[in-house]
Amino acid sequence: MNVLPPSFGHCWDLMPRTLEGQITMEKTPSYFVTREAPARISAMSKDTKLIVVVRDPVTRAISDYTQTLSKRPDIPTFESLTFKNRTTGLIDTSWSAIQIGIYAKHLEPWLHHFPIGQMLFVSGERLISDPAGELGRVQDFLGLKRIITDKHFYFNKTKGFPCLKKAEGSSKPHCLGKTKGRTHPEIDREVVRRLREFYRPFNLKFYQMTGQDFGWDG
Ligand SMILES: Nc1ncnc2c1ncn2[C@@H]1O[C@H](COP(=O)(O)OS(=O)(=O)O)[C@@H](OP(=O)(O)O)[C@H]1O
């Protein structure tokens, strides 16, 4: 997890200068789950627009595990890390791969500092099934003209994901790198079922808080 800079002044100093008509963006996945982040970002600029990309927390946990596995192939199985006690089905919520997917809990402190209308929740699933549609929402949210549309994407069968027809400043197609869109290991169906059951109430709360049904629960 990234450590945020200790002072807001320092935060500003790290940002590039923004000219009239420009938008400065910063992306750090860990902000959403960092307790101090909402107060610090709000103190830096309370007009900051916030974009959060979320996907089904069960798939997210498996994706997170797959990423760790790629760096440390000797870690225990996903199934054994999921449970504190497999017999009772008690889930280890202290495992970060599980903890991060409790979106309703992480969203709570942000709402003490930002109105919900200043936050956009992007569906990770729709980013794959309809990238132009989801980026249309992002452009609208940022008050930009819809420049990026369907025309910019094609589905790459080899990659199994949408890719750009032309990369920025190039005439060649561009897909995301090897670390995006990895094949996930097969996870025991009963473990997946238990995780779905675990996340359900948190997901429902999250749908309520955001006013969006992400469709992770059937
Ligand atoms: N177009 C396209 N190409 C490839 N991958 C795509 C795309 N759109 C979304 N995704 C999904 O993005 C997941 C990886 O994002 P990360 O979580 O690593 O992003 S981050 O940099 O940590 O924010 C990655 O997760 P994994 O499938 O687990 O690798 C993808 O499912």
Image (spheres, grey):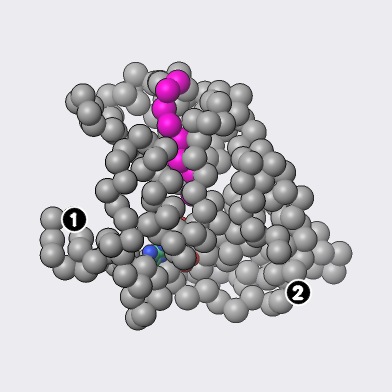
Q: Quadrant of residue 86?
A: bottom right
Give the quadrant of residue 47.
top left
The residue nearer to you, when weighing 38 against 10, is: 38
Q: Are there few (<14), some (14-19), or many (20+) residues within 10 Å of tag 2? A: few
Tag 1: amino acid: Glu
User: Where does the image place residue 2, in percent across and percent down from the top left?
Assistant: 44, 42
- Per the rendering, the mark at residue 190 is 2
Of residue 193 and residue 143, the one placed in the foreground of this image is 143
Left or right of 21, for residue 38:
right
Question: Mark 2: which amino acid?
Answer: Glu
- In percent of width and height, residue 155 lies at 35, 73
Find out whether residue 176 is within the magenta segment: no
Please tell me whether mark 2 sits on a helix, a strand or a loop.
Answer: helix
CB under 8 Å between callouts 2 and 1? no
User: Could you tell me which residue is drawn at 66 percent across and 64 percent down?
Assistant: 81
Residue 17 in sight from this viewpoint: no
Q: Residue furthest left?
A: 170
> Who's the residue at 61% across and 24% down the image?
112
On residue 168, the disc is 1
In the rendered view of the protein, which quadrant contains the C terminus?
bottom right
Viewer-proximal residue among 26 and 160: 160
Q: Callout 1 environment at 10 Å: few (<14), some (14 to 19), or many (20+)?
A: few
User: Where is 109 relative to 80, above or below?
Assistant: above
Q: Is residue 63 left or right of residue 194?
A: left
Residue range in magenta is 46-53
**Whether residue 148 can be seen here:** yes
In this picture, is 48 found above or below 102? Answer: above
Q: Which mark is residue 104?
A: none
For the point 31% across and 24% down, the residue is: 12
Report whether 79 appears left or right of 100: right
User: Measured from the top left, where is residue 1 in percent x and y?
Assistant: 48, 45
**Residue 49 shown in magenta:** yes
